[in-house]
Image: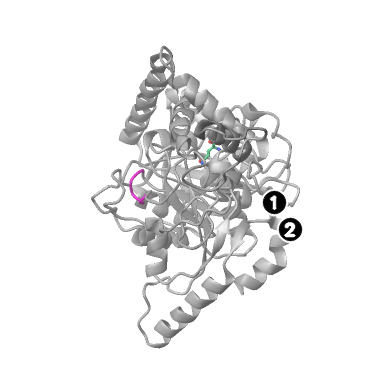
Amino acid sequence: AHLDRIAEVDGAVHAFLHVDAEGALAAAAASDARRAAGTPASYLDGVPIAVKDVLATTGLPTTCGSKILEGWIPPYDATVVAKLKAAGLPILGKTNMDEFAMGSSTEHSAYGPTRNPWDLDRIPGGSGGGSAAALAAFEAPLALGTDTGGSIRQPGAVTGTVGVKPTYGAVSRYGLVAMANSLDQVGPVTRTVLDSALLQELIGGHDPLDSTSIAEPLPSLVDAARQGAGGDLSGVKVGVIRELSGEGYQAGVLERFSESVDLLVAAGAEVVEVSCPNFVHALATYYLIMPCEVSSNLAKFDAMRYGLRVMPAGIDSPSAEEVMRASRDAGFGDEVKRRIILGTYALSSGYYDAYYGTAQRVRTLITRDFAAAFEQVDVLVSPTAPTTAFKLGEKLDDPLAMYLNDLATIPANLAGVPGISLPAGLASDDGLPVGFQILAPVMADDRLYRVGAALE
Ligand code: GLN
């Protein structure tokens, strides 16, 4: 049914870069046999899933939305993909994304944009717009995303779906093509909070192949979602982040946000306002640390090891460096080049301490703001994104306007704390979906699910 739906609507939505009908049907048949025998591999055995094209999948293309990886077929599975397969989930295909996960609209994909199923002239968010749009268009019941500065949560917000960025280290990054290692995290993209809990429990846990993976198990997420679904939040203390809910937000977004806060109060939660003064520096901090890590990570795309190799024109016997230059010039898009140059500059001798070093110190201040806030409250809340889905092309020529979308999602990545975005209804000014963000302390992902399920 999902493959039929993809055939029907994906021409217009373009959520997928690659559909693996054959593989998905074979996995579904194997699952049917296990279920018939009464021996399902997991509680999600047979439930199909779409995977963001930044996660390595044996035998399936993995392009990261970039020309430079066109034609690359990984010889191994990301740990999360291996877990999906072991649990019997048929993989429908690979979803579209901004090139190397850099962007907030999926317009930076080298393979053309994904469109928002709510309005095909609008963006589905980014970088994981493909996964979110696949859910919103009912092309898949579950998907995986990755979130470095909001790429799971912001697409969730603008497509009316649920997205979770787990605690940093709670889900393995092995086989995730790194954008910025200290910020990247794999997480669920679903239509309900309980679905996300089921999926995070399945993909999470310690992985010896990822040195940043946390050894201790998280509290049960499914139990927390079930508890929250009862709608009782008495005893829960919620903090509204002052710095993330006023100026710069669309009126229709703020309206739905305060309505969700009222629902928390009605469910018995105690709501207070909390100040996180250093969050105003989060965007600037992120846009230094992230490009530094990007410039280092993307050095490996040298036309020798993976994907595209372009021979420079007019040179008879080009040197390796000339081939690298021609390949990187042709293979990377403008946004990727912009960030490599920014990062290389910020890391260069004489600037390293002023830029990277200062940004790391501010990152610590932001982490301390979270710690202080979580001494007062159990969870923090804000709108997920400052606006609803904007029009395709609207911010493409203005990188700074594009970056502003990540205002509310970035602090969580800098501090490694978990966050969820869930639908908060439609904005009254434009009728488009609004996202409500909940943040919890490191390792307390269960609180996202309890509070999120109570709002659903
Ligand atoms: N939109 C942000 C960026 O462009 C976040 C991307 C992400 O989370 N991968 O960097």
Instruction: Please indicate whether residue 414 sits to the left or right of residue 26 in the image.
Output: left
Q: Quadrant of residue 256?
A: top right
Q: Quadrant of the N terminus?
A: bottom right
Query: Which residue appears farthest toward the front when viewing the image?
Result: 316
Identity, as a three-letter code, of the amino acid under mark 1: Arg
Q: Report the front residue among 396 and 428.
A: 396
Identity, as a three-letter code, of the amino acid under mark 2: Ala
In the rendered image, the vertical position of residue 363 relative to residue 320, given as above or below = above
Could you tell me if the residues under marks 1 and 2 are in contact, i.e. CB atoms within 8 Å?
Answer: yes
In the rendered image, the vertical position of residue 372 relative to residue 417, given as above or below = above
The residue where tag 1 is placed is 115
For image coordinates 35% across by 42% down, the residue present is 378
* Magenta-colored span: 168-172
The residue where tag 2 is placed is 12
Query: Which residue appears farthest toward the left when viewing the image?
Result: 216
Give the spatial CA distance, label 1 vs label 2. Answer: 7 Å
For image coordinates 38% across by 36% down, the residue present is 182
Q: What coloring was used for the rendering?
A: one colour
Residue 169 magenta: yes
Residue 226 magenta: no
